[in-house]
Amino acid sequence: MITPDQVLHFWFAGDPAVRRKIWFEKNIAFDSGCNRFVDALREAKLGRLDSWADTPRGTLALLILLDQMSRNLHRGSPQTYAADSRARAVARDALGRGFDQQVGPVERMFFYLPLVHSENLADQDDATRLFAAVREELGEPANESGRGHRDAIRQFGRFPHRNAILGRISTPAEEVYLAEPGAGFGPRDTGGHTMNELAEQDHEIGSGDYRYRFRRNWAQPPRWWNFGETGQAGPPQTCVKGATAANGDVYVLSRAAHPVMVFDAAGRFVTSWGEGVFSSFVHGMTIDPAGHVWIADSGLHTVTQHTADGTKLRTLGVPGAAAPTLYGKPFNMPTGIAIASNGELFVSDGYGNRRVHCFSAEGELKHSWGEPGDGAGQFALVHFITADAEDRLYVCDRENHRIQIFSTAGEVLAQWTGFMMPSDVAFGREAIYVAGADGVSIWTKDRRKLVHLGRDEPFAGAFNVHGIWLDADENIYLAQFDRAVSKLSRIDQAIQNG
């Protein structure tokens, strides 16, 4: 059973004093991270978690479930707003008991947001007043939060941007309003190749020895092809991972009509394979020293080995047959593959299990470890797994906001924290490269940060990353959530300095 502390630890990433931009953005990775709370949200809607409202922090967790995660988990559907009335009632009761004054100012916002989301003018008036006090305490301008929402309710008596989702007919005045920029109170996902003109330009970013020429839409598939359709039900349709072959070709895995596309080092399309072979929830890719391509398919519950041209050599797991959830047997929605120097395979498993499995080079299961939780050796979600040159295994425990480091025997060597939903790791000769919800960071081998490339640098949404990998020159490649493949080409310091 989910506890209030688990909700708060996830939402605030261990630091409730930090206001996170990702709360108020459309971010597929963050929405996916909320999936672990879908059962708790259902229980909260049914009133079965009302006991949480007996304390200030329990109330805070309940409000985050009802008012916030309902939006992350049901984005674009009528269920987005199904818990609003209950959230408003919980918030009103908490305000009457002074619970909002018993938490920090960033946490306090979530006591007021149910009023911001209300289609009641009195709630909007109170929300504007309460948010003004929070902003003053945080040292922020007190002239906005809730103001646009209140203006919409004052003018229309409801939020016009909800009309289409809720099946309401918009009035002519509302249609004029909806045509205005920002009328929906949130960012619009325009997709990788139509993101904005900045995505088609080169940008020099980074610092010191880690300066790069960044091209957001580096890979150029054939006309009319893409790295995932928009607006489809089910798992997010996007590019998810990639790998570089010994000859420099770049392999890209995506949830699209052409699942594996191959590009040369300039981003020009070479070939594709895998059409009709994988599920719509394909997830991980690795190329082994012999040039074989390994694919982890979360939807089919399999790990497959292929030649460079796509010929299937081996299948681990039974296609379409998931192992019982959380019983620890392979596989239930596996996510990735790492290969040790002795040829052993390590599979992160994944969305349905909370395990890592070790297979011999011949494909025989040797041992497994992991269980649900947030302690050492436990996982909230085993997202990707990567082996370094010393055969240490780095596992992205994404929803616990950390990377756990293991020996090949499953011994916990370290817990690496301080991340926001780390999704993938790549290893260079002297540095470690980490992708997460807050962008890309570069570290020394003893885990000292060298460079951080923020999610919105050099422009909004520049680093919205699911997978990261390198080539032989340690240029960086990124599989982006919004259906783009990016490249950061390292700038030679000797050339740069003349």
Image (tube, rainbow, N blue to C red):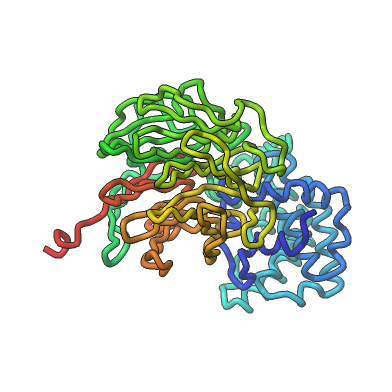
Residue appearing at x 85%, y 59% in the figure: 89
**Residue 313 at x, y percent in the picture:** 45, 25
The answer to whether residue 258 is above or below residue 50 is above
The answer to whether residue 313 is above or below residue 227 is above
- Camera-side residue: 169 or 228? 228
Q: Is residue 5 visible?
A: yes
Quadrant of the drawing holding the C terminus? bottom left
Residue at the far left: name it: 498
**Residue 120 at x, y percent in the picture:** 79, 55
Left or right of 86? Residue 473 is: left
Picture mark count: 0
- Camera-side residue: 53 or 126? 53
Residue appearing at x 72%, y 35% in the figure: 169
Left or right of 420? Residue 197 is: left
Quadrant of the drawing holding the N terminus? bottom right
Left or right of 247? Residue 310 is: right
Q: Is residue 125 visible?
A: no
Residue appearing at x 77%, y 62% in the figure: 4
- Camera-side residue: 392 or 168? 392
- Camera-side residue: 454 or 253? 253
Question: Residue 367, located in which quarter of the rendered image?
Answer: top right
**Residue 237 at x, y percent in the picture:** 53, 35
**Residue 47 at x, y percent in the picture:** 88, 52
